[in-house]
Image: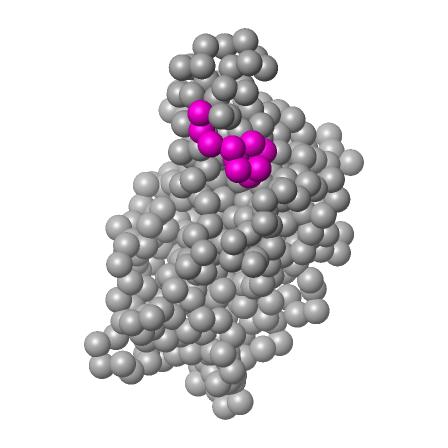
Amino acid sequence: METQDNIIKNMGSRRGQDCLQTPQESTSGQQKPFQCRLDEAWVLYYPLTDRLLVLNAMAKIVWDFYSEGYETREIASRLAHDFGIPEEQAERDVVQVLGDLVDHLPQVDDQEGGDAFIWAVESSFGCATVADNGELANCGVFQFGRSRVRVLSGVAELDQSFFLRFQHRAIGDRMGAASLEIRGNESGYQLTLDGRALADCKTLKQMLSRLIELLLSLEHPHKPMLAYCHAGAVSHRGRSILMPGDSGVGKSTLTGFLVAHGFGYLSDDMIAIGEDGLSLLPLPTRLSIKAGSWTILEPLYPALPKLATFNRYGRSARYIDPPGNYDVLSAAAAPSAIVFPAFSEGAPTRFTALRPHQTMIRLLEANVRLAGWDAATEEKLAKFIRFVEQTPAYELRYSELPGAMEAIEDLLANRP
């Protein structure tokens, strides 16, 4: 039993079409989990904790029995009988599958929801800190879309240095700017806009998720969003490409190389997929170059050695402003392809096509999340799954940036 693929990652989502409600009622009175087919896998959604899991066929069978109230030994006995395997082996497999499932099961008294994505940091924030004196630090006034926003924060992890990624959008001390406040206390975190509470969160990850979604909505008003994820994105000759990936996979270095050679810059960090036409709607951040890429990209960005260095979450980076360095696009058409960069020392440049369920798994690893602060609609998940099924996806393994760029150019040239 390939249990390593049974439960992969989690994200907020739901789906209506081709979905199956589980027979067991929720003890909390909340909506019951349901399953949806994706390619040769299934997705399982937990409404209570807003999580989505990817299951293979065997894990789905185990879940079906479990949701109907069967005990571990009963499930193992049924599997042993149906598949002709020893009961001891079946029980070991069931225990392992249920162990993965139970790790993600919603608890009645746990209203936190699934872990939100993490924006350009490692897999954990660690322990968040709040300003000792309770005062809010003025992080600056920024222009997002047509909105002017003054950011005030009492959370150390979301202080002035965090908002340096938006420094090219700073507009000085302006009257009439809306007041965006980020507060922390013993019970969690609160996000308010002009005194109106927008979100109350128990974890810093959740607060970051809410903040990023708010900034995206301000940057792209009146444009409903389907999902958003941690990804680079560029456009070339009218065709765009989405490059999801967790921190450290090399997507920012590849993005920086591409935009230095004439590709239009959309994102190297966080980007949304719009509901209308599946367009790409970026969060307007400056290009971030990590320390390991400075010597590689310095010939393309001569100002790089003179820029200030910022240390965030144990990593050093320098931020490059757009003017004179690269072209910035406010939006782009639906991606012609999804490419997952994978730098590998000495490896030849090669594309490997991915099946839709493999694409979904990798998107979950890139912290993809359906848009919407409340539980996402079933229609929204159905549309996102269609996006995953219909958009060609590849792993791009490479060791040389010029070769990777040539491969991407060829890929886009052959897409409609």
Up/down of 395 relative to 219, above or below? above
Residue 66, horizontal then vertical, whole percent: 52, 35
What secondary structure is the stretch in magenta mostly built from?
helix
Residue 79 coordinates in the image, percent (x, y): 53, 19
Asked if the stretch drawn in magenta spans residue 393, the answer is no
- Write down the region rendered in magenta: 63-73
Which is more toward the observer, 53 or 170? 53
Left or right side of 269 for 241: right
In the figure, is residue 91 to the left or right of 333?
Answer: left
- Residue farthest to the right, as pictured: 416
Residue at (44, 25) in percent of width and height: 73
Give the image location of residue 146, x and y in percent.
Answer: 62, 76
Location of residue 183 (image quadrant): bottom left
- Image quadrant occupied by the C terminus: top right
User: How is this picture coloured?
Assistant: one colour
Q: Is residue 175 visible?
A: yes
Q: Residue at x 39, y 78 (%)?
A: 152
Q: Can you give x and y, in whole percent of width and height, for residue 171 in the image?
A: 48, 78
Q: Is residue 119 visible?
A: no
